[in-house]
Image: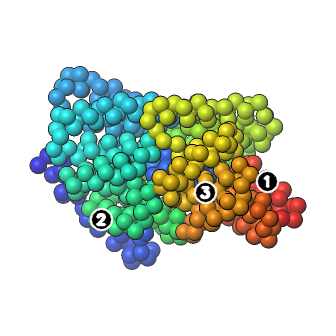
């Protein structure tokens, strides 16, 4: 038995499910991983936790590269290096590290093909980062078979099942993970599914329990950011800023917390501050959603040429991602539909929906169809995007605009009003457009 496996078998049991059962009600399925989710409220409450990835990815990569040079037969070091490459690419927004991660995991598995749960779980996380969720699920299952207490394997298995739309199985996987490896990665996944089902109060309670259980600055920052995003999504902007401040005190420079704060500044009408924040964020990590967020802030401020330059980055990043073996995600399709190639957006959204029929892919396909001038075809998908009870202002805005274009003005008025009631400033451009349509008597 490896030292890692031995430590895992001594992991505490019970987790948040026992505490939730006494005060929060039943726990649902797990957090869907969706790196690069749609800007202005179309994605998870917080960026996905790397679940075992290297903290401080730049220095971690250098140290591990030195280790494998000195000890090329160390399977554990190769697995750790692969995870560090995944984490560095995840945090930087540069998918160029994914092929190097793939090579590192291949070396680890060649050196130790049997029972190598660290390499299998790391490779599962790589597949999830590339949005190849069938592959992520397969490797996560193999990692858990090799080590039933693999935190990363258990967590990525939940993520993959949710992203494949296999929600009943995800529920069972979440219960198993909570029993075996209770901790922040599992707790935040449990909270997110409450949000997906419309139970935002339950989600908040679970996250607050998770915050109290956080034992490292990184975990504190991660959970506080999730709380900030949840508050923002409900229009509670002062509360959101308080949580973002907690995250940044724990881990200064945390890019997800900085983005949460910038998004909240924008919602409060502090456009100049939001632009300044987003400029620094995009310089560090030019993911499509972040570029779009900055572009829309520029557009709202009348800086159309600056906005155009940001939108032009979407295609560049997408091409780089494809070259690195990464599938487009719903957020990228939405960005293309609004600010890029609408035909390409529809092709990508259709392909993603066929691969995995989640609320996020349904919303992306509905919006891509609408932007292509096909609102009646879009309506059923807009309905599927809100069928779980997920209360997301961006989804509601999309549905309301589709209803308006399809000629159902009464439904459009109800849906757009609900979007603005939920989060009055969910998007600098979308919220203004919703108010314009309502003002015209939708």
* Residue nearest the observer in this picture, 78 or 356: 356
Please tell me which residue is depicted at 68% across the width and 38% down the height of the picture: 340
- Residue 103 visible in the current orientation: yes
Q: How many marks?
A: 3
Does 233 appear above or below 291? below
x and y percentages locating residue 36 in the rendered image: 53, 44
Image quadrant of residue 333? top right
Task: Name the N-terminal-most of marks 3 and 1.
Answer: 3
* Residue nearest the observer in this picture, 390 or 362: 362
Q: What mark, if any, has residue 363 been given in the picture?
A: 3
Please tell me which residue is depicted at 55% across the width and 35% down the height of the picture: 318
Callout in the foreground (3, 1):
3
Task: Name the N-terminal-most of marks 1 and 2.
Answer: 2
Q: Which residue is mark 1?
A: 433
* Residue nearest the observer in this picture, 117 or 382: 382
Residues at marks 3 and 1, CA–CA distance in whole angstroms = 18 Å
Q: Under tag 2, what secondary structure?
A: helix
x and y percentages locating residue 301 in the rendered image: 79, 39
Q: Under tag 1, what secondary structure?
A: helix
Q: What mark, if any, has residue 52 been given in the picture?
A: none
Q: Under tag 3, what secondary structure?
A: helix
Does 427 appear above or below 18? above
Residues at marks 1 and 2, CA–CA distance in whole angstroms = 44 Å
Q: Quadrant of the C terminus?
A: bottom right
Please tell me which residue is depicted at 59% across the width and 30% down the height of the picture: 316
Residues at marks 2 and 3, CA–CA distance in whole angstroms = 30 Å
Q: Say whether marks 1 and 2 touch (CB < 8 Å).
A: no
Q: Which residue is mark 2?
A: 176
Does 74 appear above or below 430? above
């Amino acid at each position: 038995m490896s030292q890692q496996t031995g430590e895992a078998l001594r992991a505490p049991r019970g987790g948040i499910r026992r505490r939730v059962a006494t005060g929060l009600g039943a726990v649902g399925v797990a957090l869907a991983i969706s790196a690069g989710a749609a800007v202005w409220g179309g994605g998870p409450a917080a960026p996905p936790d790397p679940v075992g990835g290297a903290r401080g990815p730049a220095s971690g990569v250098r140290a591990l590269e030195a280790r494998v040079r000195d000890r090329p037969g160390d399977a554990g070091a190769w697995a750790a290096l692969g995870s560090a490459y995944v984490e560095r690419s995840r945090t930087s927004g540069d998918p160029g590290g994914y092929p190097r991660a793939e090579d590192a995991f291949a070396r680890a598995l060649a050196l130790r093909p049997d029972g190598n749960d660290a390499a299998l779980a790391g490779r599962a996380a790589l597949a999830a980062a590339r949005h190849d969720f069938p592959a992520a699920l397969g490797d996560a299952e193999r990692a858990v078979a090799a080590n039933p207490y693999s935190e990363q394997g258990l967590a990525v298995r939940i993520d993959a099942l949710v992203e494949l739309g296999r929600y009943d199985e995800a529920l069972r996987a979440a219960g198993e993970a909570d029993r075996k490896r209770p901790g922040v990665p599992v707790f935040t996944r449990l909270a997110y599914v409450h949000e997906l089902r419309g139970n935002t109060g339950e989600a908040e309670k679970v996250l607050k329990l998770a915050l109290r259980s956080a034992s490292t600055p990184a975990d504190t920052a991660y959970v506080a950011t999730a709380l900030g995003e949840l508050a923002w999504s409900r229009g509670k902007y002062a509360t959101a800023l308080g949580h973002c401040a907690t995250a940044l005190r724990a881990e200064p420079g945390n890019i997800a917390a900085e983005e949460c704060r910038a998004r909240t500044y924008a919602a409060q009408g502090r456009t100049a501050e939001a632009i300044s924040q987003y400029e620094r964020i995009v310089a560090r990590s030019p993911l499509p959603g972040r570029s779009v967020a900055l572009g829309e802030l520029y557009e709202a401020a009348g800086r159309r040429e600056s906005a155009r330059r940001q939108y032009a980055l979407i295609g560049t990043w997408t091409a780089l991602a494809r070259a690195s073996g990464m599938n487009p995600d719903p957020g990228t399709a939405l960005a293309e539909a609004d600010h890029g190639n609408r035909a390409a957006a529809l092709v990508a959204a259709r392909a993603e929906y066929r691969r995995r029929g989640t609320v996020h892919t349904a919303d992306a396909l509905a919006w891509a169809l609408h932007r292509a001038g096909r609102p009646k075809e879009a309506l059923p998908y807009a309905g599927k995007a809100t069928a779980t009870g997920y209360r997301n202002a961006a989804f509601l805005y999309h549905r309301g605009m589709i209803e308006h274009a399809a000629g159902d003005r009464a439904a459009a008025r109800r849906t757009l009003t609900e979007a603005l009631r939920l989060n009055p400033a969910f998007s600098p451009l979308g919220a203004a457009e919703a108010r314009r349509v309502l003002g015209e008597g939708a």
